[in-house]
Image: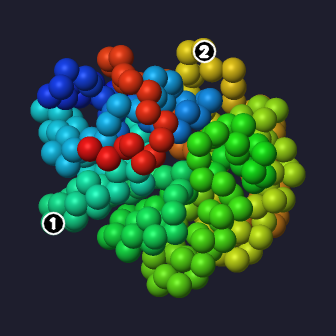
């Protein structure tokens, strides 16, 4: 029998609360910030802006909350509320702590400065996922108005990955959330072909959005997803579709929300604690 996902409300010391998700595959998805500054239109996490970074102990608090209700995570992924690369110091310290405990950690990021990406690649991660959600900058700007531009991000990513060990390169992947009529044309994927030709070890993960109240976006049609999947395979791209746990209503992708009013602070320079 399939075990359903469990969304966990985690109270913080200042009266706010963040959400984590325990997936049926025994992976716990953790938040990294109270809110988010990126303002992605398909995501509920940044709807009220950013309040602050999570402290190191608040990363661990989410793990403690899961264990307190009888859950036993075997892997962790920092891909919930917030942009992990904007809370890099605490993220790195947390990953090192979990390595000492024998809990593998994956990280999902929309990208950032080359030096920040390089630091992420040096961490002992189970996987590092780069969320693109577009192949052309105009589309990415529409969906993710404050995310790092592709023109600088992709060349830096390729350079860093080429300089990394083969073991590290195999841990790298691309997340792509398919949204009907917005980013699901083959032109978007044709624009990404140079990336996958430069880094043949990369895996492309085609994701489907979970319901977000008030969002104008909806999932691509199944036939469109299949067309893109087959096109990618024909062009030699290692491509995967989202597993069943990520497609459940409690799947977490883009649905985690802040549980108290926040002050909007979209400037990454103001994100540090």
Which numbered disc, 1 or 2, marks the residue closer to the eye? 2
Q: Nearer the viewer, residue 5 or 263?
A: 263
Residue 79 shows in the view = no
Please report whichever mark, 1 or 2, sits nearer to the chain's N-terminal start: 1
Quadrant in the rendering for residue 64 = top left
Real-space CA distance between mark 1 and mark 2, rounded to the nearest whole angstrom = 42 Å
Is 264 situated left or right of 150 in this image? left
Residue positioned 29% across, 58% down in the render? 89
Q: Going by the picture, which residue comes out furthest to the right?
A: 187
The correct choice, above or below, for 214 with respect to 247 in the image is: above
- Residue at position x 57%, y 22% in the image: 211
Q: Colour scheme used in the picture?
A: rainbow
Q: Which residue is mark 1?
A: 100
* Residue 124 drawn at (x, y percent): 32, 70
How crowded is the residue under tag 2: few (<14 C-alpha within 10 Å), some, or many (20+)? few
| Residue ID for mark 2 | 214
Please indicate whether residue 201 sits to the left or right of residue 170 in the image.
right
The tag on residue 61 is: none
């Amino acid at each position: 029998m399939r075990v359903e996902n469990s969304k966990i409300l985690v109270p913080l010391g200042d009266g706010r609360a963040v959400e984590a998700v325990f997936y049926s595959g025994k992976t716990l998805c953790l938040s990294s910030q109270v809110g988010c500054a990126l303002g992605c239109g398909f995501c509920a996490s940044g709807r009220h802006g950013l309040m602050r970074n999570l402290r190191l102990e608040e990363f661990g608090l989410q793990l403690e909350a899961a264990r307190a209700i009888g859950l036993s995570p075997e892997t962790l992924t920092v891909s919930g509320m917030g942009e992990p690369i904007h809370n890099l110091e605490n993220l790195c310290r947390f990953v090192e702590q979990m390595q000492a405990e024998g809990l593998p950690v994956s990280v999902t990021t929309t990208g950032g400065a080359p030096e920040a990406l390089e630091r992420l690649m040096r961490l002992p991660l189970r996987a590092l996922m780069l969320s693109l959600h577009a192949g052309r900058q105009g589309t990415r700007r529409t969906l993710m108005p404050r995310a790092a531009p592709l023109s600088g991000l992709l060349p830096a990513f390729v350079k860093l990955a080429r300089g990394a060990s083969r073991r590290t390169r195999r841990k790298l992947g691309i997340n792509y959330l398919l949204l009907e009529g917005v980013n699901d044309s083959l032109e978007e994927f044709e624009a990404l072909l140079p990336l996958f030709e430069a880094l043949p070890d990369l895996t492309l993960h085609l994701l489907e959005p979970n319901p977000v109240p008030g969002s104008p976006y909806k999932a691509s049609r199944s036939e469109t997803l299949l067309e893109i999947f087959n096109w990618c395979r024909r062009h030699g791209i290692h491509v995967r579709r989202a597993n069943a746990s990520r497609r459940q209503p409690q799947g977490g992708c883009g649905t985690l929300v802040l549980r108290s009013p926040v002050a909007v602070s979209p400037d990454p320079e103001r994100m540090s604690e």
